[in-house]
Amino acid sequence: MITLECINYIKNFLTDGNNGDRYIHYGKPNESNKPVIIVESDFFKSEFYGTEHLIPTIPLKQLEYELPILFGEAVIERKKNQVVIYADLIASSFFLLSRYDEAFCNIERDKYARPIGKTSFKAKASILNRPLVDEYREYILTELQRLGYNIKIKRKLNHIYMTHDVDHPWKNYTKIDALKTCIKDFLIYHRINLSPICNAMGNYKRNNCDTFDWLFEQDAKIKTVYGQKEDDVYFFIGLNTSSSTMTMRYWDDPKALRYVERIQKHASICGVHASYEAGVQGELLKKEKENVETILGRSVHCNRNHFLMSVSVDWLTYLEKENITEDFTMGYADCIGFRLSTCRSVKWIDPMTFDVHDLVLHPLSVMDSTIIEPQYLGLERDEGISYIKNIIDIYEKYNGDFSFLLHNDVPADARYCWCKKGYEEVIEYLCTLL
């Protein structure tokens, strides 16, 4: 059965941390004088808990203002000093925040075994592009305002994370591959690019992956405007063996120290980039984290999984075992959407045990490859930038923690020629919002 700690955490999350238990009673009507009564459904009591039988029926019921609900009834009863909501917003929030469907259902996965956003329950229910839990929060806060409580609804970005996965500090070209790349760049993209040949010869002064000074400059613009409400975060690979999943071993290469030292002077936060292999075999994370801490010369407490790969919901226990306190993996690779149905950072709620863990999950708002890769959205510049700005607007509306992922090797890649200017335009847009 669900724990009181879990219920109270969700109450707080739905009231913006304003001591939710003071305002919300979760149970039956007429058994409390608290201003908001959320009537409990049978979700947590059901003999079918932990099975696919509790997946909500589509189309979802809708409360007023076209607000979808997953459990309970779309009925609200307003009294002079109280509102009774028969829609079970606690169970609905729990289902979404805990990834119940990923934990207990036979969901569709891609060739890397990652959950597919476009075929997820949220997509089928037409709520993938809505931070539904935040909409519940706004609904409850609006009702409290109507009842005379002095509670403000914040409309600014709460925090900005400009994050960068350092998958490749440089490319390990063979001489033949380097020559092929240079010829391709000239014939297809009409540019003379000799960096691959230089790299194949062991000269890394010209290195297309070295976009770090430009990244520092761009992210500093946001830091100037937002101050402590912005962090630029860099994630490093600690894998012991290069793999077929484009995972590069570099942590013990002396050449990598040049890049790491430069990054550490500018980055707010450095973390471990758990490999695809570690996302399958969580035991590998321990050594990878140790390797990253060796190259950084300090401990790390943040993680993002390479390829956004984690084989199961309870994989997060491996992060906690290694004293990781913040994770930035919570997004879909194939599309932009709210994997946790919230714009805000949230503690990990385990649907199997009902435990609320100290591990904080940051929603992944936008990933470069999702926007530009043809197998995903494959958007061109104008459409891509407009799409990203619309996402930012949603995060601003709900006081969210916006997290952008730009890999260091993408801005100089000829295939994605608009990304560099596009990123600069996104930076400028973010700077106008404070």
Image (cartoon, rainbow, N blue to C red):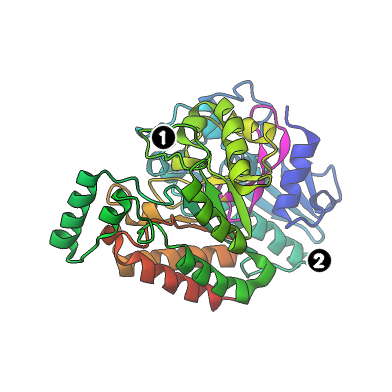
Q: Nearer the viewer, residue 51 or 376?
A: 376
Region of the chain picked out in magenta, as a range: 340-362
Q: Quadrant of residue 324?
A: top right
Answer left or right for 331 relative to 385. right
* Image-quadrant location for residue 88: top right
Q: Which residue is situated farthest in the left direction here?
A: 187
Residue located at (79% from left, 38% from top)? 5
Q: Which residue is mark 2?
A: 149
- Quote the CA–CA distance across marks 2 and 1: 57 Å
Residue 162 image offset from top left, x and y in percent? 54, 61
* Circle 1 Cα neighbour tier, 10 Å, few/some/many (<14 / 14–19 / ≥20): few
Instruction: Assign the N terminus to one quadrant of the image.
Output: top right
Q: Is residue 92 visible?
A: no
Residue 120: percent from the left, percent from the top? 43, 39
On residue 300, which mark appears?
A: none
Tell me the SS state at disc 2: loop
Disc on the earlier residue, 2 or 1: 2
| Nearer the camera: disc 2 or disc 1 | 1
The 10 Å Cα crowd at callout 2, few under 14, some 14 to 19, many 20 or more, is few
Amino acid type at circle 1 is: Ser
Residue at 26% across, 58% down = 415
Q: Which mark is residue 242?
A: 1
Q: Is residue 304 placed above or below 290 in the rendered structure?
A: below
Query: In the image as oriented, which residue stretches furthest toward the top?
Result: 47
Q: Pick whichever, 81 or 281, lies toward us.
A: 281
Q: Amino acid at mark 2?
A: Tyr
